[in-house]
């Protein structure tokens, strides 16, 4: 008898019980993120998240939000494994484009800029051509290091929470970007700020069996309760299951490409000469990683691959797996 055949015992009809090994769903998965932060009954949770990530205080704090209709959202198919449809406007008229990104892809920063800038421009389609457009803020939570900590370069590291905008003497702030890089949080339960508490929440929720002391206070307790799998209906569990499989497939494609490249390198090394086989295997592995990440292998890049030897190929492969882009 599988897990589903025992689901729902002792619960209301139509409610799907959680698997025995999982209590809370992963809030980084698109379905769960939208369930928590993208529904009208839970908009106070999104208010709290935005106030924390924007570090708003006093009169500057967001008091209320209005979700924008699906027709006003900006679909960008290239932003794979991301939530791009939690889009809202605050009581002062400022708009927000909020998403969770699980995997880094080539030129991801440019795609984020495009998505948020397009949301700013599309305001002019409402019929008001006065160009009195509201500010737009892009809020992106990354499950990877978008800007890895530099090693021995002398450059200052980009912090876990960073804000970006065009700026000169006039401070062009109509379009702003906020990034929260989850892997940069390493303190565990020893949280010291609300932002750190949010980072901790996103990092550990799926592995919790009970609500820990550092997440007992509001809004974190309510946020965790919204992620409790025991409250999912069968349809919600199926949606969550499909989303998890999609994420695992994407990560698995990268891992498989890496292993195949290494295996081919070893096999061809014995048949055609160990060195040449390893080099060709590395090239094949790089091609597989590029395919999995959606990185275009132009003629120029293929020519560069052909001219590289083993050390340069290893460096390129490691950089692709780390940064998810061909810089």
Image: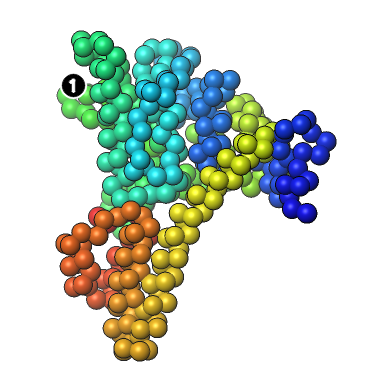
Relative to 49, does residue 7 appear above or below in the rendering? below
Q: Check the image and name the residue furthest to the right.
A: 10
Q: Closer to the camera, 58 or 48?
A: 48
Q: Quadrant of residue 309?
A: bottom left
What's the residue at 18%, 21% (across, down)?
170
Q: Is residue 18 left or right of 87 when viewed as pictured?
A: right
What's the residue at 32%, 23% (across, down)?
136
Q: Quadrant of residue 220?
A: top right
Residue 57 seen in this snapshot: no
Q: Residue 1: x percent and y percent?
A: 78, 54
Q: Closer to the camera, 14 or 316?
A: 14
What's the residue at 30%, 77% (across, down)?
280
Q: Residue 304: x percent and y percent?
A: 19, 67
Q: Is residue 7 left or right of 117 when viewed as pictured?
A: right
What's the residue at 27%, 41% (across, down)?
110
Scheme of colours in the image: rainbow
Q: Which residue is mark 1?
A: 170
Q: Image quadrant for the C terminus? A: bottom left
Q: Quadrant of residue 161?
A: top left
Q: Residue 76: x percent and y percent?
A: 34, 37
Relative to 232, does residue 95 appear above or below in the rendering? above
Residue 219 seen in this snapshot: yes
Q: Residue 152: x percent and y percent?
A: 31, 58
Relative to 11, does residue 170 appear above or below in the rendering? above
Q: Which element type, helix, strand or loop, lies under badge 1?
A: loop
User: Dot 1 surroundings within 10 Å: few (below 14), some, or many (20 or more)?
Assistant: few
Q: How many dots with numbers?
A: 1
């Amino acid at each position: 008898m599988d897990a589903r055949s025992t689901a729902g015992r002792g619960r209301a009809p139509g409610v799907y019980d959680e698997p025995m090994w999982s209590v809370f769903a992963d809030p980084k998965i698109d379905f769960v993120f939208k369930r928590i932060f993208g529904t009208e009954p839970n908009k106070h949770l999104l208010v709290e998240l935005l106030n924390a990530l924007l570090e708003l205080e006093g009169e500057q704090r967001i008091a209320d939000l209005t979700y924008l209709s699906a027709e006003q959202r900006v679909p960008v198919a290239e932003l794979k494994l991301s939530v791009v449809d939690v889009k809202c406007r605050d009581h002062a008229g400022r708009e927000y484009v909020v998403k969770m990104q699980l995997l880094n892809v080539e030129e991801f920063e440019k795609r984020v800029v495009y998505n948020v800038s397009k949301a700013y421009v599309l305001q002019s389609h409402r019929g008001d051509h006065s160009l009195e457009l509201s500010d737009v803020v892009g809020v992106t939570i990354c499950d990877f290091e978008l800007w890895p900590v530099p090693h021995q370069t002398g450059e200052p590291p980009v912090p876990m929470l960073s804000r970006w905008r065009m700026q000169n003497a006039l401070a062009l702030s109509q379009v702003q970007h906020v990034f929260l890089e989850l892997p940069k949080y390493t303190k565990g339960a020893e949280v010291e700020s609300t932002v750190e508490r949010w980072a901790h929440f996103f990092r550990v929720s799926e592995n919790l069996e009970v609500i820990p002391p550092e997440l007992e206070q509001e809004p974190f307790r309510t946020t965790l309760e919204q992620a409790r799998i025991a409250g999912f209906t069968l349809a919600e569990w199926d949606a969550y299951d499909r989303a998890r499989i999609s994420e695992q497939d994407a990560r698995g494609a990268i891992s498989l490409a890496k292993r195949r490249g290494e295996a081919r390198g070893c096999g061809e090394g014995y048949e055609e000469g160990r060195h040449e086989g390893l080099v060709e295997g590395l090239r094949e592995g790089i091609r597989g990683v590029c395919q999995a990440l959606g990185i275009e292998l132009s003629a120029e890049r293929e020519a560069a691959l052909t001219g590289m030897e083993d050390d340069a190929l290893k460096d390129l492969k490691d950089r692709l797996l780390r940064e998810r882009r061909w810089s």
